[in-house]
Structures are given as C-alpha cells and as structure tokens.
Image (spheres, grey):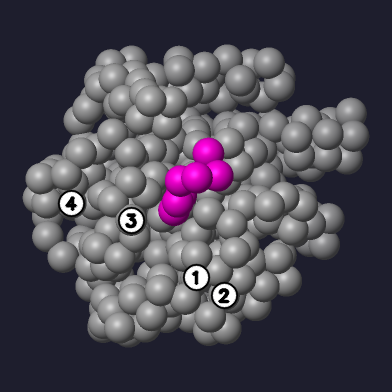
Amino acid sequence: MLDQNNVFQTLRDHGVTYFTGVPDSYLNGFCNYALLHCGDRNVIAANEGNAVGIAAGHYFATKEIPLVYMQNSGMGNTINPLASLADRDVYAVPMLLLIGWRGQGNTEPNHPQHKLQGEITPGLLDVMHIPYTILEDDDRKFSETVERAVTYCKETRGIYALIAPKGVMADPDKPNNVDDVYPMSREEAIEVILDHMPEVTVYSATTGRATRELFFLREKRGETKARDFLNVGSMGHCSSVALGIALSRPERHVVALDGDSAAMMHMGAMTMVSKVQAPNFLHVVLNNGAHESVGGQPSAGHLVDFTKAAEACGYATVGHAVTTKEELIEAISQLKDCGKAAFIDCRIHKGLTRKLPPIIFDHRAAIDELIDDLNG
C-alpha cells in the first residue's frame, strides 16, 4: 500500500485538501486516513453522484480542486453529474476522481458482480473524455502522477481520474470494530426475523455483510437458500428488487434486509410504497450507522429518523426504531400482516459476531432456484 502520509502530503502540496465520496475497501487506507485527519474537509456522501455535486459546490465556493473517491461499482451514479454538470462544455468543474478498481483482470474470480464493471472502468472514463492514470504502489510515481493530474485540472478546468488497483490504497487488515451502542448484532437481528416470519417468506439481502450473514445462517440452520435473493452488487437496490417481487407475488411475504448506508444511497425508492399496494412487503433497515463492509467509516444511519421518513413515504411502522430482540419480535408481530407495506428501523451495533469467509456460489443457479420457487 502507498504511504498514506505521503499521499495526503502530496495532495496538500498541490492544493487538494477537500475530499468527498463513498468509502471503498480498495481505498480503505485512504478513507480511514481522511476520516482521522481531515475533519470536516472529508464528507462521506450518500452516493457517488451526491459526492460529485458536493465537490462541484465546493469548487464554486472556493476555486479549490476537490477529490471525489469511490469504488468503480459507483461510477454509474456519477455519470450524469460528470457529463451534464462538471463537463468542460457545461460548468467546467475541475476535480480529481480516485476510483477503486474492483474486478480488474481476474483478481476476483468468485465475485462476478465485479467482472463487467472491472472490464469497463477505463472505457467509461474514455467515453466521458476523462484522462486517467492507473496507480502503482510506488510513492515517487504517485507524486509525479498527482502533479500531472492537478496541472491538467488547473489548465483545462477538467476532470482527471486516478484508478487504484487492489493493494495500492488498501490496508489488507480490516479491523472488526465492535461497539456496544445497541445490544443486537446484524446476524442476531436477521435470525430473529427468520424465526418470526413464515417459512416461505422471500428475502432480499443488501450488498455487503447482510448477504454473507444470511447465506451462512441458512447453512447453520440447515435451511434452503432457494427463497433468498443476495444483492451482491447494485448497492441500494435490494429493497426495489424486493418490492418488485412483492407486487408480482402478493400471496408471499417478502422482506428486504437493507442496510442504512444502502438505503440512503437511493432513498427515493422508499417513496414507491405511496403509489402501489404491497401489504406483503416488509422493509427492514439493519442500521449500525456505518459502512461496515468497507472499513467501518460512519454513515448518517444513527442520525436519521428512518421511521418518520418511512411514515412520510407511506409505510406502516411501530412509531420508533427497535433496539432489542424483544422490540424487534413485537414489531414483526404488529406489522407482518398489518394490511400495508411496513418498515422497521432496526438499530444494531457495529462489528461481526463471528468471522465469515467470502460467499462463493453459482449466481445463475441461485437465482434460477429463486425463480423456480416463485413460479412453482
């Protein structure tokens, strides 16, 4: 990994001291350094497009070149603001993009959700006429690259991207940061839900730890995985998939096991229940106030009143967040057959209850099992 002291000193030397973006495991060395040392000049955004907008506003207000960080899976969220706001033919907003390159080459053969994104990462930048450099684990070359990139941004009022392959900006040791703010873990909360929903309930689990924990809970409990949709990519969309299933199979209970960061990434999806009838849909946000899968950086999860937001969007709720197993059981009892789409903000603590390996499975076989179950 690049020396992060040198990384940030080099950026400071060239006037880049404002950072915003969405944390990424391939950038966890960079993200954690920014979190510890940059204070309010590091803004963790709801999604990557949000970060580009924040960066643009910062430039308008200060004329300083900002840096936007993201995993390459989030590049899609940036395309609209990069092409129609920041482009040189529109408002000409100079900025650096730091992009973690998941799926480069054959670096993640067990994670096909990164394969196509890895293949098209440089091409997306080419299509948008954004020059880039693929970073190496070499401090001298990094300094030279930043000098060249910032010079380009200043001279052209353009955008320059820095692509970080595996190991260049990431500390290989991700700590398991456990807190005791709330008594339940995510795994415990998922197990309570499994125990208190009908056996044939369909589950849509969000990107990150929720998918992994649901997968291994099924194995521990000796249960079928045929009713589970593991949303291993497309962060922020597991509740939309769940709603689509619920609308098409009104006789089945459908539960979205969402995360706070994922739910906030595309929070507009919550408004859909005001337009449609989905009484079989239960949306649970497993809210630990953190981007746990990529290093534990804080989210706004524990600062936002999800329950009030959900009520305003048309969900039934119990009127407050739940924080214990007993409260979660009572909420499920009240809401699972309440006659309308329902929502639970389930407050949990950070950290893992046990060390789990990555999930390795045949994605096509798994989705075909779910399709057969839904259409059988």
Badge 2 amino acid: Thr
Using residue 83 as the reference point, say whether residue 97 is left or right of it. Answer: left
Residue stretch in magenta: 249-255
Instruction: Categorize mark 3 by other alpha carbons within 10 Å: few (<14), some (14-19), many (20+).
Output: few
Q: Which residue is mark 3?
A: 198
Q: Nearer the viewer, mark 4 or mark 3?
A: 3
Q: Secondary structure under badge 4? A: helix
Rendering coords of residue 69 (x, y %): 53, 46
Q: Secondary structure under badge 2? A: loop
* Residue appearing at x 24%, y 52% in the figure: 213
Q: CA distance from mark 1 to mark 4?
A: 23 Å
Q: Which residue is more in the foreground, 376 or 73?
A: 376
Q: Earlier in the sequence, mark 4 or mark 3?
A: 3
Residue 33 appears in the figure: no
Q: Earlier in the sequence, mark 1 or mark 4?
A: 4
* Residue appearing at x 25%, y 22% in the figure: 362
Rendering coords of residue 39 (x, y %): 52, 73
Q: Secondary structure under badge 3? A: loop
Q: Is residue 253 magenta?
A: yes
